[in-house]
Image (cartoon, helix red, strand yellow):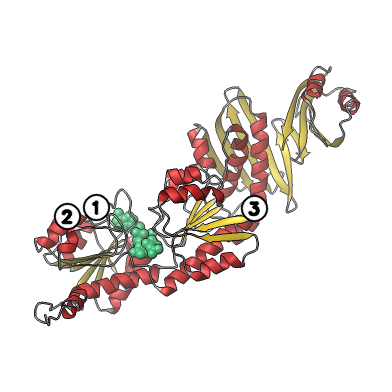
Amino acid sequence: MIKVLVSDVLGDAGIQIFKDTDGIEVDVNTGLPPEELKKIIGDYDALVIRSATKVTEEILDAAKKLKVVGRAGIGLDNVDIPAATKRGVVVMNTPTGNVVTTAEHAIAMMMALTRNIPQGTLSLKAGRWDKKKLQGREVYNKTLGVIGFGKIGSIVADRARGLRMRVVVYDPFVTPEQIQKAGFESITLDELYAQSDYISVHVPKLKETTGLLDKTAFAKMKDGVMIMNCARGGIVNEDDLQEAIASGKVAGAALDVFETEPPGECRLFELDRLICTPHLGASTREAQTNVAVAVAQQIIDYLINGTVINAVNVPSVAGDLLKKIGPYMAVGDRMGCLQAQLADGPVNSVTIEYTGDFKGMDMAPVSTAILKGLLTPMVKYAVNSVNAPVVAKDMGIKVTESTTAEAEDYTHLITLRVATEKGENVVAGTLIGRRDIKVVKINNFRLELVPEGHILLIFNKDRPGAIGGIGTTLGRHNINIGRMHVGQEQDGEHNIIFLQTDTQVPPEVIEELRSAQMVNTVTPLEL
Ligand SMILES: NC(=O)C1=CN([C@@H]2O[C@H](COP(=O)(O)OP(=O)(O)OC[C@H]3O[C@@H](n4cnc5c(N)ncnc54)[C@H](O)[C@@H]3O)[C@@H](O)[C@H]2O)C=CC1
Ligand SMILES: O=C(O)CCC(=O)C(=O)O
């Protein structure tokens, strides 16, 4: 049974998908304090969260079986992604399900702020009729500055256009042409500060965006500007915002997100000109159904079919691509495993060459499979497609990759060079037909080896009787040879022999073979 823990409130439709899937058992246990989560997380293969659960290094350490963390939503600042990657845990989100809802919330916040709707509600319920005090402003013909023209920012810009606002955009990672093509003005950040009557932030929370709107930024803005933050707490510095509103520089602000959530006591709340919601940006029935369904389907697809969608710490391998490159991932894994056993000492570098018709294929998952195969026997902990590149980096292994369209003897060939202090081994592999994995070259030897099972790799002198002697020795020990491949050295006097045996060859038999005449080396391989 695959066990899934849902630790934050998730739409029923998502929970139902887990319940309806054979082989999956789902537990919903929300609002757990970290120490309680730590006690139970060891039982689960998958964890489903929103923004409340903090997936820290400590939690991940206790999560011995965990394979995937699925965020029903976008922001992942509550997940220690590097720590998850190191432990081989896939982290995925659902990047599109709540973007319309969140953009609508930003627009709702702007309208509520500019027309004093929350203040009007409060004062009326308190028995007052504050018509004069609560006079607002039109947004028509005003300038909205959108910072971050991603999925949500671009929808906010579009909806504001419908309100007949002038929209200016700052996003250093989107070309001015793209912004103009969407019908908006692309300007610098300082220009946006100087021109905007309303500013709405829609950037991820990163080192570079934390405190993006601070006292220096406020000083560059128009007097009476209004600020909206429905992205992440801390992108707008709360202390600086408090001062800017108190001084009248900023006429008002609408916050859906806070530096600490829940914020508890907060000086900003003393200001009438601050309106707020408790991180409600994504809280609509539609969005919660979208993200719950998406996260459940993605997790099931990963745990049952190995399909990776919307992962942030591993290349996505979805449907069609998986069909195409899945078999090559298997070739890569076998080649890496073979190289690990050929390597004489710590690995310094890995060079991967893809030759032939790999056009239109992103080979990153194959390279990761190669590293996984190579590193698995070398480290004590589990290596998988998530942490393999990080493990290689931590071990100081230099990994390079190249692709050449010109095929030689095979339409698709993967060549893997692994170098240690003592030298380099070269292994080349391919697929024959759609699924048959063949290793076709090891160093100077050409062959056609099926890389599976118990194998003895023997280098011997290419003389009459050499192979017969090896067979006799194994026969004497009652070891059956399933398959044998012999490869001849190009321009040399040696053979390479691969013996696939039905059972593992005991160490004393290997020693006996090593001492036989005409045998140079014997290496047992488990593939
Ligand atoms: N309040 C809520 O309930 C929700 C909040 N969010 C938050 O909304 C924000 C935006 O989400 P999406 O639009 O989905 O993200 P996105 O990744 O689609 O877009 C972010 C944009 O910000 C831009 N960007 C990055 N650094 C920048 C910088 N220094 N200056 C200007 N632009 C920069 C990127 O180029 C990108 O175009 C995120 O912080 C996300 O966590 C998302 C969903 C719900
Ligand atoms: O799950 C939620 O309510 C918050 C959504 C959010 O902030 C996100 O998706 O980034």
Precedes in sequence: disc 3 or disc 1: 1
Dot 1: what SS?
loop
Q: Position of residue 398 (x, y in %)?
A: 51, 34
Left/right placement of residue 419 relative to residue 129 reads right
Precedes in sequence: disc 1 or disc 2: 1
Above or below for 48 versus 378: below
**Marks 1 and 2 close (CB-CB < 8 Å):** yes
Query: Can residue 509 be seen?
Result: yes
Q: Residues within 10 Å of mark 3 (few under 14, many from 20)?
A: some
Dot 2: what SS?
helix
Q: Quadrant of residue 156?
A: bottom left
Query: The residue under label 3 is which amino acid type?
Result: Gly
Residue at figure coordinates x 21%, y 62% from the top left: 192
Left/right placement of residue 314 relative to residue 111 reads right
Residue in the foreground of this view, choosing between 255 and 424: 255
Q: CA–CA distance between discs 3 and 1?
A: 43 Å
Residue in the foreground of this view, choosing between 90 and 196: 90
Residue carrying label 3: 326
Left/right placement of residue 479 relative to residue 523 reads right
Residue carrying label 2: 240
Above or below for 122 versus 153: below
**Marks 3 and 1 close (CB-CB < 8 Å):** no
Q: CA–CA distance between discs 3 and 2?
A: 52 Å
Residue carrying label 1: 211
User: Where is the N terminus found, in terms of image quarters?
Assistant: bottom right
Query: The residue under label 1 is which amino acid type?
Result: Gly
User: Where is the C terminus found, in terms of image quarters?
Assistant: top right
Residue at figure coordinates x 42%, y 74% from the top left: 285
User: Under 8 Å from ligand 1: the CB of mark 1?
Assistant: no
Q: Quadrant of residue 247?
A: bottom left
Q: CA–CA distance between discs 1 and 2?
A: 9 Å
Precedes in sequence: disc 3 or disc 2: 2
